Amino acid sequence: MEPNSDANQRIAMIAAHLNPPNLMMEDASLRTAHCRAKGGAPGFKVAILGAAGGIGQPLAMLMKMNPLVSVLHLYDVVNTPGVTSDISHMDTGAVVRGFLGQKQLEDALIGMDLVIIPAGVPRKPGMTRDDLFNINAGIVKTLCEGIAKCCPKAIVNLISNPVNSTVPIAAEVFKRAGTYDPKRLLGVTMLDVVRANTFVAEVLGIDPRDVDVPVVGGHAGVTILPLLSQVKPPCSFTPKEIEYLTDRIQNGGTEVVEAKAGAGSATLSMAYAAAKFADASLRALRGDAGIIECAYVDSQVTELPFFASKVRLGRGGVEEILPLGPLNDYERESLEKAKKELATSVEKGVSFIRK
């Protein structure tokens, strides 16, 4: 039998693991021994800002599973210790570190290659994305000020709604700081593409993984414009199918908000879409060729300063913004409606910083 001293030491170690001291103290630093996986893997350093939220938690799990991630920083103003501890137990290569509260924002951002921002309040029944503006605009401003100071060369994937306005806000913050690189700021509209692929596949009766639907414009209501004339594999739709698909893709978020009946918004599908887009960004950073995705970016595709369309990603972010391609009459009419509303949203974001 083991000596009593050895047994007591083992019991003490187990107790310390189950009840790490000071882990939940708001101002306490999240100690390395308590919230990081040992080891690590070659790859990129990724930060998630808003990691304890409805999108942030599943997104953190998915990014921990990504073999291109070597270091994963999880930041939020509440509940980060628990999320970090939980995620860190996954037996994948990424080292996980948690950061809690405004005082630790800069530590969370130093040296990051990719910053993903799902932070903000979620939509509730009856709310539009614009209803979120006043709260989320201030959150995005603060976080982007930290990025400008601590990792100005990082690729930024911005999820916080309303994306049509928060991306211009981020751009203005970076301009003020003298760090703005339009190629490195991308509004994540991937959920619109994911929904379009899924809904079109349902109509066609095929696997959604075999479908590619370009979705352009913005990321709210009528600004979301699926180009159903450019669907791959090539196919045709009846006018009734076009109306149905366009309406469902544009209002997919509302569909989820209403189905959850006050219990949240589209968090799981958004986390999946965000992880898919982040993976594309990381593969591009690695140097992979031919990475083309839709994103809401600083653009000259239309007369608007920001617009979502297909972009080719590379080591520096957006390497090329692809043209819209041929549009049918329905899409051209819808584009004009989208641009009118999008212009207002962009101006709202810019004015928030310049006022």
Image: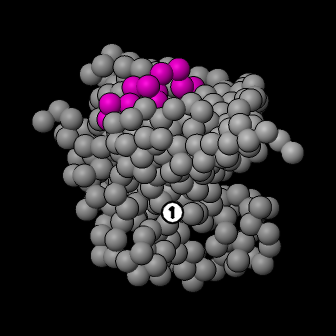
Image quadrant occupied by the C terminus: top left
Which residue is pictured at 42% across the width and 70% down the height?
A: 264
29 relative to 348, above or below = above
Q: Is residue 97 visible?
A: yes
Quarter-wise, where is residue 281 in the image? top right
- List x then y, in percent, for residue 140: 33, 41
Determine which residue is flagged by label 1.
267
Whole-percent x, y for residue 325 in the image: 60, 48
Residue 238 vertical placement versus 343 (above, below):
below
Q: Which residue sits at x=71%, y=37%?
A: 5
Q: Is residue 63 magenta?
A: no
Q: In terms of depth relative to the viewer, which is nearer, 265 or 229?
A: 265
Based on the picture, tell me whether residue 104 belongs to the magenta stretch: yes
Q: How is the image coloured?
A: one colour
Three-letter amino acid code at disc 1? Answer: Thr
Left or right: where 35 falls relative to 28: right
Of residues 333 and 110, which is closer to you in this image? 110
Q: Residue furthest right?
A: 1
Task: Tell me what residue is drawn at x 44 percent, y 63 percent.
Answer: 334
User: What span is in magenta?
Assistant: 102-116
